[in-house]
Amino acid sequence: MDGKIRHVEARGASSASARRNLQQKLVDRKTPRDGLVNSRDQIKKLAGVFLVELEGSDKASRTKDKYVYCVNKYILPALGEVRVGEATSGVIDRFIRRLVEDVGPSTARSCGAILSWMFKVALRHDAVTRNPVIGISIPRGKKAKPKALDVEQYQDLRAKVIEWEQEPALGRPRTQELHEVSDFLIATGVRPGELFALRWDDLDIAANPPTVFINATVIRMRNGGVSIQDHPKSQHGIRHLTIPAFLVEQLLVRRERQLESGAPNPLNLVFPSSTGTPIDPNNVGKLWRKVADQAGYEWVTLKTFRKATATRIARTMGPEAAAYQAGHSKISMTQEHYIEEIHEALDTRSVTEAFMPKNAAPKIDQQALQPNRAELHMQYKMDI
């Protein structure tokens, strides 16, 4: 490290042994003695250094929890005893491909990102000369095309949810708020965690138009509990959204109902739990899947409401407005994962009529040529 040339000696039982020991000494001298890890350390030691750096980073709490879980669940059992200097690209590649087969591409990609970060730490401590993760290809899982609820489907689903809420149940009474949760989600397109972190102070119902300020989300902690994170999933998630009139009326009734009940609500939440604490979105999601399956809408999750909102806004106001509503940084993300493809032909005749030849025949009554849609639909059903 100081630039001076030094003689290095090593001894052994034979000339070949002494030569091997000398070569190993030279390898070890490549790593400064004040480094936290060197090439002969095992990956489990590198993982410890990485976890300390991870804890002090600005990553979201959910990301930190996910990375810690992946390190303990997958990386350490498979690679923990491997020396840092022996972790070649081939070793990492075989590990990643086994993960793809066993648990899927999503977890494999997370582990790949963690290992890349870990070996960047090793590079900084001169434990390796290159990052062995660079160049490894991790396949992506097949993503289904987004499917959104239309207005008629939502009204039918909502009626069935209310019917489920009003059915008599043994033991603890059923929640009466599931349809209100779904109304708010589909009317605003917010994430469930953002909804359950919403405070009454974030609402400006008296404004014209009435708005809601999305600035926080509910996250799950390592101890199994939940807490409110003081920012959404990303910086683009901080946004003001308008509220439709029917939702304003629901919120006014809800506010009045909360005040009359006298239930604890120290955080002034719009949707608190029965004890006044933040609601766990995972628990609501589990309950929703049960109700949706019973209603015949097993493909509908809480995330489907965001897709319905984004799709409807995109078709009327454009994908840019849909991306802002959803809190996305990239319009391409909204288009790929949230906006359902249009399966019907767009009526563009008012635009393409401009190309009509000058000496064209008299205009044809297009309405007269169009068959009765109801009759066609009935004939189609009869044919089936």
Image (cartoon, grey):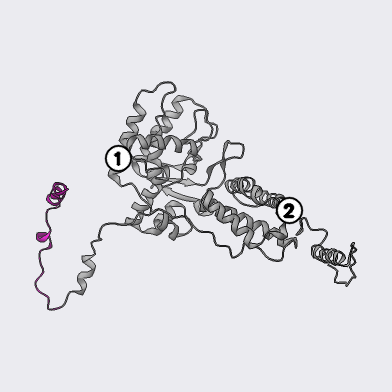
Q: Residues within 10 Å of mark 2 (few under 14, many from 20)?
A: some
Q: Which mark is residue 155?
A: 1
| Residue 362 versus residue 313 in the image, above or below | below
Along the line of sight, which residue is nearer the eye, 276 or 378?
Answer: 378
Q: Is residue 96 magenta?
A: no
Along the line of sight, which residue is nearer the eye, 329 or 120?
Answer: 120
Q: Is residue 359 magenta?
A: yes
Determine whether, in the image, residue 227 is placed left or right of residue 52.
left
Answer yes or no: is residue 368 visible.
yes
Along the line of sight, which residue is nearer the eye, 301 or 229?
Answer: 301
Answer yes or no: is residue 233 visible.
no
Task: Report the magenta residues as a range.
Answer: 358-384
Q: Residues within 10 Å of mark 1 (few under 14, many from 20)?
A: few
Q: Earlier in the sequence, mark 1 or mark 2?
A: 2
Q: Position of residue 33 (x, y in %)?
A: 83, 59
Q: Position of residue 100 (x, y in %)?
A: 53, 53
**Residue at x-position 41% and y-position 57%:** 336
Q: Are marks 1 and 2 in contact (CB under 8 Å)?
A: no
| Residue 36 versus residue 208 in the image, above or below | below
| Residue 133 versus residue 360 in the image, above or below | above
**Residue at x-position 72% and y-position 62%:** 124
Q: Which residue is mark 2?
A: 42
Give the SS element for disc 2. loop
